[in-house]
Image (cartoon, helix red, strand yellow):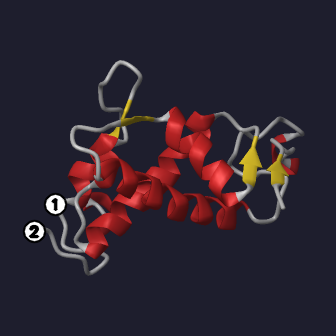
Amino acid sequence: MTLRLGLGRDAMSGGKQNHGASVAHNGTQESRERWAQEAYSVLLGVARTYHAVITYKEPGTEVQERSGIHTRAPLQYWIGWVLGKVVREAHRRGDPPLTALVVHSGGTVGEGYKEVLEASTTSCGCGPSTARGSGCSPR
């Protein structure tokens, strides 16, 4: 079964399109959680190849195909959340920061790489801003 998610309409925004924050499907959070699980698997595969990297578009397409959950929302509206979940999970498991393998088509890291660095500065991987006041301790 393939589930296709639309952009949906947000009643609170006067009917403006909501690009991925609340897709017209009740399982948006579930969808992103599932995509994060699939992304972890995709990035583990990339990590097994010496000097391999993957562009942002590739895991975006792959997680939708593997999960059977698709969206028309532009990649930039949801891939950051998915990769953020992956970097925190990798840190929790004691794995290398798998999301460091995700680059722009020109080979440079994106804004999300900052989260890789932040996760490595706390004992729980939640990042410095979340760690403050949460009982998490900096490394």
Residue 139: numbered disc: 2
Residue at image position (73%, 55%) is 69
**Dividing the picture into quarters, in which one does residue 94 lie?**
bottom left
Foreground residue among 83 and 129? 83
Instruction: Give the percent coordinates (x, y) of residue 8.
Output: 85, 45
Residue at image position (49%, 55%) is 39
Identify residue for label 1: 121
Q: What element carries label 1?
A: loop
Please indicate, yes or no, whether residue 125 appears anywhere in the rendered image.
Answer: no
In the picture as drawn, the residue positioned furthest to the left comes out as 139
Instruction: Give the percent coordinates (x, y) of residue 113.
Output: 30, 42
In the picture as drawn, the residue positioned furthest to the front comes out as 49
Quadrant of the image for the N terminus?
bottom right
Answer few, some or many: residues within 10 Å of disc 1's Cα (few below 14, many 20 plus, some between 14 and 19): some
Answer few, some or many: residues within 10 Å of disc 2's Cα (few below 14, many 20 plus, some between 14 and 19): few
64 up-or-down from 72: above or below: below
Foreground residue among 138 and 70? 70
- Which tag, 1 or 2, sits closer to the chain's start? 1
| Left or right: 132 as drawn, with respect to 104 | left
